[in-house]
Amino acid sequence: MTQASTTPVNVGVLRMPGVASPTRARRRLLTIGHSYCVAVNRRLAHEMAREGGEHWEVTAVAPEFFHGDLRPIRTEQMPGELCRLETVPAFLSNRIHFFFYGRKLHEILSRPWEIVHCWEEPFIVAGGQIAWWTPPETPLVFWTGQTIPKNYPPPFSAIERYCVSRCAGWTTRGENGVEALLPRGYDAKPHRVMPLGVDVELFHPDRGVGERVRAQLGWSPAGAPVVGLMGRFVEEKGIRTLTAALDRVESEWRALIVGGGPLEGCLRKWSERYGDRVRIVTGIPHDRVPDYLNAMDLMCAPSETAPNWREVFGRMIVEAFACGVPIIASNSGEIPRVVADAGRIVSERSPDELATAIGDLLENPAQRREFAARGLERVRTTYTWSIVARRHLDFFEELLQQGAV
């Protein structure tokens, strides 16, 4: 067993009306997710342990190894982590719908827990496995990123029905998820919108770091403003729309495109016409993302809805907010609700509209500063991991008080 961290420290009394004495026994929370193999992705578990203080003991379970979207990952350690960490084998992790955990997870789930929190989709094999192995008397809470009503083929349809019937409640990243799932039987169980959070200790404005990144890229400090994109190089992230928009922008610009994926070749071919005005960077670990965000003067998130996908949340948006980077984003999925008044929203698949928005912000530093300030405020009031963790614990407390199983 790989274990990293200490028992959570006492950081204060949990703020819950109607709850008995603060001296009660600590509740034991188990949270499971394949994304927890990346240390910064366990910030939710870490913050639930911090926010839970003397009332919650939090254990996170991660795969020993997982095939990530951009790179293979062995579970990373995090110094000073407040949650306990246990790792288990995972199999077929390069096929997300079919991957499953080893039997060590069965032993972990058999221990006494007040709540099991499953950060796996309820229609994949791993989600069904967790539901099946969680003892019937233990409340189970699922997370789902679904935003479009889908009819899954067997066996995934049966797995989903079982998980929904078995769970005590579920969470989703945005209102699009609620709207999509309520008509499909999910309305029978309590639910809450739980956005992703931002690690504000890692993601914060730092122009000095940004200037060093620009220098490493061979760019002078006096050059044109930098337009950025951060994420997967796939059609649904609007890569082609962004490049077509930049072709139309008349103001001076440089472009920093960070991520990886199948459209990398197309991006590099497009960049040839612009020479050193464009930098394409791949293989960046998540803990270095803030450095590259701070090298941007504005970031674009031109996501595009597909028949089987629309933007679930847009993590790169709130991370850019936290770094003080103004945003131009499309109206796909949950993005307009995430951005609110802290950025510019444009239509999907509209290079002309995106080009106009980019040109406007390039020529208007005051507007960029205004959007940056609004984005920072949204993070501080809505998207810090401590706020998101508190919302999770409050929901878990509600379920326990209602006796939901």
Image (tube, helix red, strand yellow):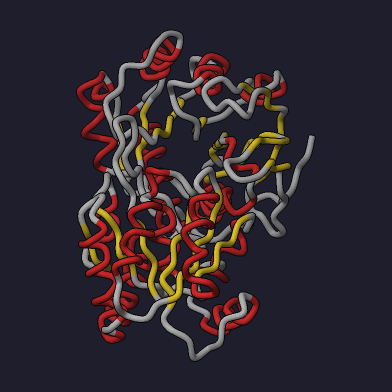
Q: Where is residue 121 in the image (x, y as percent from the top left)?
A: 45, 28
Considering depth in this image, is 167 or 361 the residue closer to the camera? 361
* Residue drawn at point x = 61 percent, y = 21 percent: 100
* Residue drawn at point x = 48 percent, y = 77 percent: 205
Considering depth in this image, is 67 or 108 the residue closer to the camera? 67
- The C terminus: image quadrant: top left
Q: Where is residue 67 in the image (x, y as percent from the top left)?
A: 65, 36
Considering depth in this image, is 324 or 246 the residue closer to the camera? 246
Numbered disc total: 0
Left or right: 171 as drawn, with respect to 59: left
* Residue drawn at point x = 61 percent, y = 40 percent: 68
Q: Where is residue 404 in the image (x, y as percent from the top left)?
A: 37, 24
Q: Is residue 88 above or below residue 379?
A: above
Q: In this view, does 405 lie above or below 298?
A: above
Q: Where is residue 193 in the image (x, y as percent from the top left)?
A: 31, 43
- The N terminus: image quadrant: top right
Q: Can residue 54 be seen in this view?
A: no
Q: Is residue 359 above or below residue 60?
A: below
Left or right: 104 as drawn, with respect to 267: right
Left or right: 342 as drawn, with respect to 56: left
Q: In which quarter of the image is residue 33?
A: top right
* Residue drawn at point x = 49 percent, y = 55 percent: 267
**Which residue is farthest bottom?**
222
**Which residue is farthest right?**
1
Left or right: 181 as drawn, with respect to 206: left
Q: Can residue 231 be seen in this view?
A: yes
